[in-house]
Image (spheres, grey):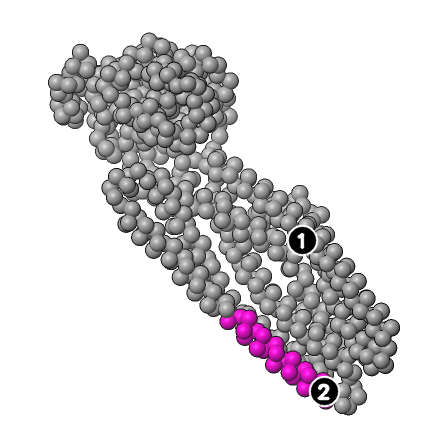
Amino acid sequence: MKKLLKYLKNYKKELIFGPFFKLLEAIFELIVPVVMAKIIDNGIGNNDSGYIFRMCGLIVLLGICGLAFALTCQYLAAKCAYGFGTELRSALYEHINKLSYSGIDKVGTSSLVNRLTNDSNTVQNGVNMFIRLAVRAPFLVIGAAVMAVMIDVKLSLIFFVVAPLISLVIFFIMRKTVPMYKRTQQKLDRAAMLTRENLEGTRVIRAFSRQEEEMKEFREAVDEIADCSIAVGKISAILNPVAFMVMNLGIVAVIWGGGLRIDSGSLTQGELTAFTNYMTQILLALVVLANLIVIFTKAFASANRISEIFDILPEESGEITEINKNSENILEFRNVSFAYENSGDESLSDISFTLKRGQMLGIIGGTGSGKSTLASLIPCFYKVTSGTVLFAGEDVNNYAPDVLRRNIGYVPQKAVLFSGSVRENMKWRTENASDEEITAALKTAQAWGFISQKTDVLDTRVVQGGKNFSGGQRQRLSIARALVGKPDLIILDDSTSALDYATDLALRKALKEDMSGTSVIMISQRTTSLKDADKIIVMDDGKAVGIGTHEELLSSCEVYQEIYRSQMNEKEGDANA
């Protein structure tokens, strides 16, 4: 929690004056029983209606002042809590965006979303309740106890019996419920993960008619949350009945003992009434304090979960801010090996190759052979375990990430478009790209054909995830986005899989003609897509089992030969004739 306190630095006034006004409200609340005692003893006892009306007016005045102080505190608490929550969420979101792929993998996307929304709201609520009640409840307990002792020391001994009893009840209930609140937060992570998976994979779920199974799994997850919450609720429900039982028994004891004190002349009726009010205030404040402990427990648990994200170090940034445009090699791997965190086996082992400017490199291999992993090391999404990846003659770790990635056009396996217009999506890599540059990139990516037929052309709306375009259209738009600004290197990570052979061929020809100075890395399952590459790397189980041209690999690499023979048929031959 301490790490999050810095987000309260802009709300020091609210943190000071909020509890101060709540303290004033509590003071006025403590004065009311004294006034009531005077009304009973002096007004009613002496049948003085004028005195009674004056004292009732004072009670009304105290109530109005207390209300004003309470509203002021509420306003200051809301301003502080919601301002704190806004700054916390903004900082957390910014930090998440600075994490490396490894950092995000540690926590998981669903858990990150849950911490950014649910946990931050819980901490925000904790701050709100702290300002509003954290000072008031303890002050009422202490203040009422002092006032009671001032009225009658002997009778106040009942307080020191009843208060510890209620405190013990609170302690045992908190001891049971605190761990259960933490488990509930963890179960919320699982429900968030299932929600995300189901919403993103809705087409697949329906294609396999898995709606019932998925709904059953989700019901089980939310039932676990409900069961845990109900269990906590059942235990917490004991608090109020037991507390009020003890409180009422204490009031009975006060009235009984007070009656004896009145008979002996040591106490007046008004003082007994005030004494009873103070006892009620103390015990109610203890119940409020118990509820505050629950809120603070949740807040601290959520704060710790948020702090765990801040503890993950952001992506390391190098100091080089310029790319050497005169280097002969645009990319070089020197004995590169890589293993994912907490994974025993290496995903890549001893990979070495060079790629010159303007050349095309093809990467092929079976599923899980390490093709995409290799590609993700180039923009430094992951750090190599051993060896060196050089871009334009310099270790990729030495570049500032944004500088390195501005010079690399990366198209992932899954085509991802964002809501907005086609023009806005095309400007993701180069913000000041002109319409002419965007149009040229769309033409090269073979996307201009269907975009030009749209009524709004570049202003055509793109819905979330690009669902208003087909799979092949999304892939071509993703490729066009990477081409805008003509980066030094383009990585196509199996991003032509949804294209037909003719469009694939046209794309490769356009890349060669329009992007002559740009190096291209094309990862593909098709040997026909890579046959014109200057160099092809054949991956198998994380190792480069063959490096060479199409013809060289056909004569020397058994893995490549098997892939080629399995794919060659008359249709493919015609498409590449």
Q: Can residue 328 be seen in this view?
A: no
10 Å neighbourhood of mark 2: few (<14), some, or many (≥20)? some
Q: Is residue 221 above or below residue 267?
A: above
Q: In this view, does 233 lie to the left or right of 40?
A: left
Q: The disc labelled 2 sits on which kind of residue?
A: Gly
Specify the label residue 74 is tagged with. 1
Check whether the beta carbons of the residues at disc 2 and disc 1 lie within 8 A of each other: no
Identify the mark nearer the N-term, 2 or 1.
1
Extent of the magenta region: 238-261
User: Can you name the residue that lies furthest to the bottom here?
Assistant: 264
Query: Residue 240's x, y, as percent?
Result: 55, 71
Of 181 and 464, the residue lying toward us: 464
User: Residue 39, position in %: x, y?
Assistant: 81, 75
Asked if residue 290 lies left or right of residue 320, the reply is right
Q: Which residue is drawn at 46% across and 64% down?
A: 232
Q: Is mark 2 on a helix, strand or loop?
A: helix
The answer to which of 183 and 4 lies nearer the viewer is: 183
Task: Provide residue 265's location: percent of width, then percent of height.
Answer: 80, 88
Which one is nearer the viewer's eye here, 81 or 68?
A: 68
Please tell me which residue is depicted at 74% across the width and 80% down the height of the picture.
272
Check the image and report above or below for 19 versus 563.
below
Q: Which label is found at residue 259?
A: 2
| Residue 563 vertical placement versus 338 (above, below) | above
Type of secondary structure dominating the magenta stretch: helix
Within 10 Å of disc 1 (Cα), the crowding (few <14, some 14-19, many 20+) is many
Classify residue 51 as left or right of residue 337. Answer: right
* Residue 513, picture quadrant: top left
The three-letter code of the residue at mark 1 reads Gln
Q: Is mark 1 on a helix, strand or loop?
A: helix
Whether 297 is among the magenta residues is no
